[in-house]
Amino acid sequence: MKRIALLGPVLAGLLVFAPVPAGAGVGPASDVYVVHGIGTDLTVEPPQNPVDVYFKTQAATEWDLLLDEFVFGEIAGPVPVSEGDYNVLLCTSDDVADPLDTITACQDNGTSNAVNSNAGSAVSVPAGENNITLVASFGLERPTVVPFVNDVTCVQPAASARLAGLHAAQAQTATVTANGATAGTLDFGDSFDVDVPAFPPNRYDLGVSDGAALLLNIDDFEPAPDTLTNLIVVGSPNGYSAIAQEIPLAVCEQPTTTTTTTTAPPPTTATPRPVAATPRYTG
């Protein structure tokens, strides 16, 4: 996808040349994904709500274009991002030849062209967490960017999978059920994960409700082995959707088996002794 190709070099240049914000760490980078979750229907064509996404450290004075013409349902990444505090700005796309031009209108026109305010959304990339998903969401009051930390540690046994629910929809709470049983109840911005047997042969019927009504139903969901599947619940009362994001899990180290080879002692020979036998007859 062209936006993944765009994402890499833009962020790479930003991380190399942008000033490091005060207090930011210098630890290992995290893999960061960006998900467009501002919309109500994943099936319509053309896709809903194209935006241009800008990114900068909080100490920087200029924005860098991260993604252009980014549409509802798309996922970009991963790219490495050093720990620290950043701002992400979403601007309604003007479909111009140079997407960098939209940043002027986005900042000058207040919230009329900026879907999450001129300052953007503050996002922290924590130290020690190696996998982050940023979801552009309607939010509860206005569009925003919501960060989620992904658990990509291995699962036991190796044939299992991990299923996660991420609440980024315009609803106060969301309850996720799997095959009729409650898997987790989430507030906006929360997530949960659970390790489950993978497909084949296991399938799951998943539901998402707000406590009063069913928002979303997914039949015959098939989790892939050794994979984290994020079911990202997005949308508003005008319509809810789930965006599925698959991320490979680490592979568990298998215990090593030590084989000991022993040499059998040489056979010994002995002179057989006669055995006295008394014949027995029946009949």
Image (cartoon, helix red, strand yellow):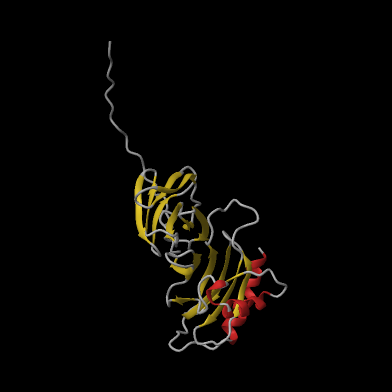
| Residue at 53% across, 70% down | 115
| Residue 15: percent from left, percent from top | 57, 82
Most foreground residue, 104 or 222: 104
* Closer to us: 242 or 127: 242
Tell me where residue 235 appears, x and y as whole percent: 49, 57
Above or below, 4 against 176 in this view is below
The answer to whether residue 59 of the structure is visible from this angle is: yes
Depth order, front residue of 34/126: 34
Q: For the image shown, how many numbered marks are present on the structure?
A: 0
Residue 53, quarter of picture = bottom right
Q: Position of residue 206 (x, y in %)?
A: 43, 47
Residue nearer the viewer, 46 or 6: 46
| Residue 115 placement, left or right of 211 | right
**Residue at (59% x, 62% y) in the render:** 49
Position of the C terminus by quadrant: top left
- Residue furthest right as drawn: 97
Left or right: 87 in relation to 258: right
Q: Residue 48 vs residue 267: left or right? A: right
| Image quadrant occupied by the N terminus | bottom right
Give how far across and how far down residue 252 sits, in percent.
44, 61
Query: From where the camera sits, is residue 259 visible?
Result: no
The outermost residue toward the top is: 283
